[in-house]
Amino acid sequence: MKTYCLAQINIAKMLAPIDSPVMSDFVANLDRINRLAEESMGFLWRLKDEDDNATSIKVFNDEYIIVNMSVWESKEALFNFTYQSAHVEIFKRKKEWFHKMADMAMALWYVKEGHNPTPEEAKERLVLLNKLGETPFAFTFKSDFDSDDALNYQSKL
């Protein structure tokens, strides 16, 4: 039997260039928060560049949009990191660094164990979430979809 894990993408549109004074405190916390993620229960993988983060990886046609992607053993593991760890203190400060986005900026979906999704794959999930709403193909923490739901849904596409 194949095992599935939870993948996520979240994007944010910066108020200023990454090397600007506006973004300096966000940048100063990146390594600490990335390390916290990697040390969290259930963490499996995250997208990163040669600087050990993903701020230089451009997925959208907007130089101010940065992307974060990761894979977790479960939705609960990702939820715990996001909302019940020191990550939440940075999350609460997002208005200092990022614009409020009109569309959904985060999508979750299931991947086969060992699969690290590409930025293009993640972008497709986010685009479809915004177009179709929550489905087993792309959803948020509010949904109760499991990997069986995702498999059944994808077989109908």
Image (cartoon, rainbow, N blue to C red):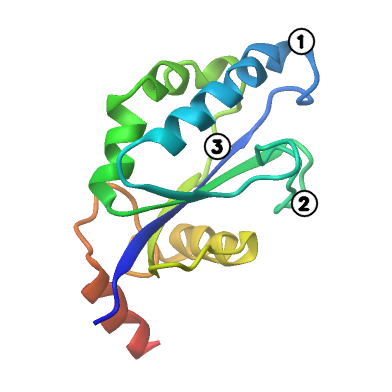
Position in image of residue 47 (x %, y %): 59, 49
Position of 11 with respect to 131 (left or right) is: right
**Residue 133 makes an appearance in the image:** no
Position in image of residue 84 (x %, y %): 27, 26
* 3 or 2: tag closer to the N-terminus: 2
Instruction: State whether residue 1 is above or below residue 114.
Output: below
Q: CA distance from mark 1 to mark 2?
A: 23 Å
Label 2 crowd (10 A; few <14 / some 14-19 / many >=20) = few
Q: CA distance from mark 3 to mark 1?
A: 22 Å
Instruction: State whether residue 79 is above or below residue 91.
Output: below
Residue under label 1? 21
Seen at 31% across and 29% down, the residue is 83
Position of 98 with respect to 90 (left or right) is: right
Q: Nearer the viewer, mark 3 or mark 1?
A: 1
Seen at 49% across and 65% down, the residue is 128
Residue that extends furthest to the left in the rendered view of this protein: 144
Q: CA distance from mark 3 to mark 2?
A: 15 Å
Q: Nearer the viewer, mark 1 or mark 2?
A: 1
Nearer to us in this view, 132 or 12: 12
Seen at 41% across and 24% down, the residue is 87
Position of 153 with respect to 28 (left or right) is: left
Residue under label 2? 61
SS at mark 3 in the image: loop
Nearer to us in this view, 65 or 147: 147
Label 1 crowd (10 A; few <14 / some 14-19 / many >=20) = few
Residue under label 3? 101
The quadrant of the picture occupied by the N terminus is bottom left
The residue type indicated by label 3 comes to Met
